[in-house]
Amino acid sequence: MKLGTHRAGQPGPPDSSHGQLGPCRPPQQNGAVPGERGKQDKSVKRGNWSNQIECLHVPLLHHAGVLWYPPLLHGALLRAVRQPGLPRGLEGQPHVQSNAWNTPDCVGVLDGNLSSRAALNLALNATQKRTSPSEEYWRKYVLDLSDDIGNLGEVRLPLLGCLGVSWVVVFLCLIKGVKSSGKVVYFTATFPYVVLTILFVRGITLEGALTGIMYYLTPQWDKILDAKVWGDAASQIFYSLGCAWGGLITMASYNKFHNNCYRDSIIISITNCATSVYAGFVIFSILGFMANHLGVDVSKVADHGPGLAFVAYPEALTLLPISPLWSILFFFMLILLGLGTQFCLLETLVTAIVDEVGNEWIIRRKTFVTLGVAVAGFLLGVPLTTQAGIYWLLLMDNYAASFSLVVISCIMCVAIMYIYGHRNYFKDIEMMLGFPPPLFFQICWRFISPAIIFFILVFTVIQYRPISYNDYVYPTWAISIGFLMALSSVICIPIYAIYKVCCSEGDTLLERLKNATKASKDWGPALAEHRSGRYAPAFSPSTESHLEVQPLQPEKSRSEAEAASPVQGSNGSAHSQDSRL
């Protein structure tokens, strides 16, 4: 299947019937449609990725963004240059820490001999109140945690400073949109894999690493029927792959029209899951070593959420030789992952604003839009740098970034497959790829994916449990705010649907509903040269104004004559394309 269109003002494709290349440029392959001659299908207004590597790097980097939470950046920066709670002269033995933020229950163990482990086990069994230096450094120094979510306390100036630095870096990397961010991710997307490999090689050589890895690989079958497990797994996949966040759609919108999105989706999905599994080996090999060193089960040293990255794993790194080196590598990797995730999320919001307004004025001033969004993000992050910031962070993470994602993705599947129509959707993909999507994907999109998402949604509601942080139980008013945050990103969907039905033409409600669910007249590819078949434009002022017009070249005489010849569209139909588009 060929798309024989060419851009106005440039030499046309060679005439295959005569077997001559003619006076045309060397073809610029886009790598999507087999047998298609390369052509310029870039969007002049919005811009495109420079190459395929850039468009793959950003989604791959997005999936591991632990430091999306602003307060955690400061912990990474401090831990990268400092070893917490290790008084000089006490290395190699159980000891009580002597820093200003330490409590009498803070005990660190840096000795691997049996007597030290036995002494620690006795202390644990006797008091059950032992806290690690990493935990107290994290909670009492970095966060300076308050006693209640309503007690904001003071703004932690180090956290505020790191929040500002992170937003400045993100803005500078996105100052030119995808042109600048595409270059930055060459480093930020590849370096974390280098660090993971270094830590993996070091971890598997430690005593007890196999115990940690077996704990990681051994399934807990009693958790299979726990809806929270499935809900957390769904949230992790949605977040790591960017489903329902808008990040994937935004990044994909900067691809060329004939980009092989089928290939990209396979690469990103496999790489995402493989990276998560690989990172699990890195984490649990070190935790297995720590559990062996302390003489306890791996489950006693494993943690979840921020506690894993900033308490359990750092404490395990203190037990390694040359521990500052491993700490620097680990937390520098987390910083890069967090910045990379911010690139994607910020670009998503900026692109949505610019595309929604859509005029030349705002397109030329996209840098100022990026600056405005960055400043707004900084100001909204200030409450998270207070002493109660971690409470608010986890509240948003559990409600605004969990439940609503499942709802939005379920609505998205139903809207595309059953309102827009699966046949229209499959034809659109075939027009871009040159071949229809495989049957497996068609079945998943129509039946399996909506059913699984709906199943997770129902069981998440049935087995709902209020949020808590360690021993702190959130008050009712805070949980109510959490539900309102979750509702805020979902309620706009039915509100806008009701608005469109009320504004649609029709005498009855059914007629209005049918008209509201129809595609708009200007729906279709952004570039005029891609509007073939059912998207061939009827030239009227209303539709012509929405098409992006590529700049004309000086050689009008030849180009206009060539553009009048019929060309083969992606749907197999022949039509002529006016070069004056």
Image (tube, rainbow, N blue to C red):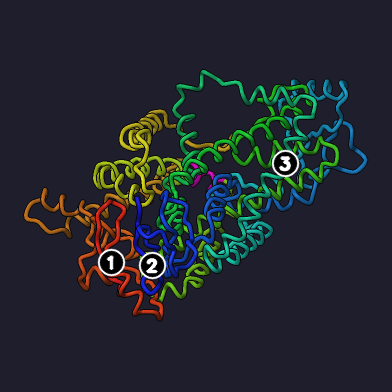
Q: Residues within 10 Å of mark 3 (few under 14, many from 20)?
A: many
Residue 481 spot, x, y in % from top left: 43, 47
Return the residue found at the far left: 507
Q: In front: mark 3 or mark 1?
A: 1
Q: Does residue 81 sit above or below 556 in this rendering?
A: above
**Is 382 displayed left or right of 204 in the figure?**
left
- Whether the residues at callouts 2 and 1 have beta carbons within 8 Å, the answer is yes
- How far apart, in angstroms, are the residues tagged by discs 2 and 3? 69 Å
Amino acid on which the number 1 mark rests in the picture: Ser
Q: Does residue 542 sit above or below 345 in this rendering?
A: below
**Is 104 displayed left or right of 37 in the figure?**
right
Magenta stretch in the rendered image: 391-398
Residue 348 spot, x, y in % from top left: 46, 58
Label located before the other in sequence (3 or 1): 3
Residue 553 spot, x, y in % from top left: 41, 78
Q: Does residue 337 sit above or below 295 in this rendering?
A: below
Return the residue found at the far top: 222
Residue for point 59% across, 54% down? 340
- 23 or 1: nearer the eye? 23
The mark found on residue 136 in the picture is 3
Does the rendering let one see residue 142? no
- Whether the residues at callouts 2 and 3 have beta carbons within 8 Å, the answer is no
User: What residue did someone put label 2 on?
Assistant: 12
Amino acid on which the number 2 mark rests in the picture: Gly
Amino acid on which the number 3 mark rests in the picture: Glu
Q: Residues within 10 Å of mark 1 (few under 14, many from 20)?
A: few
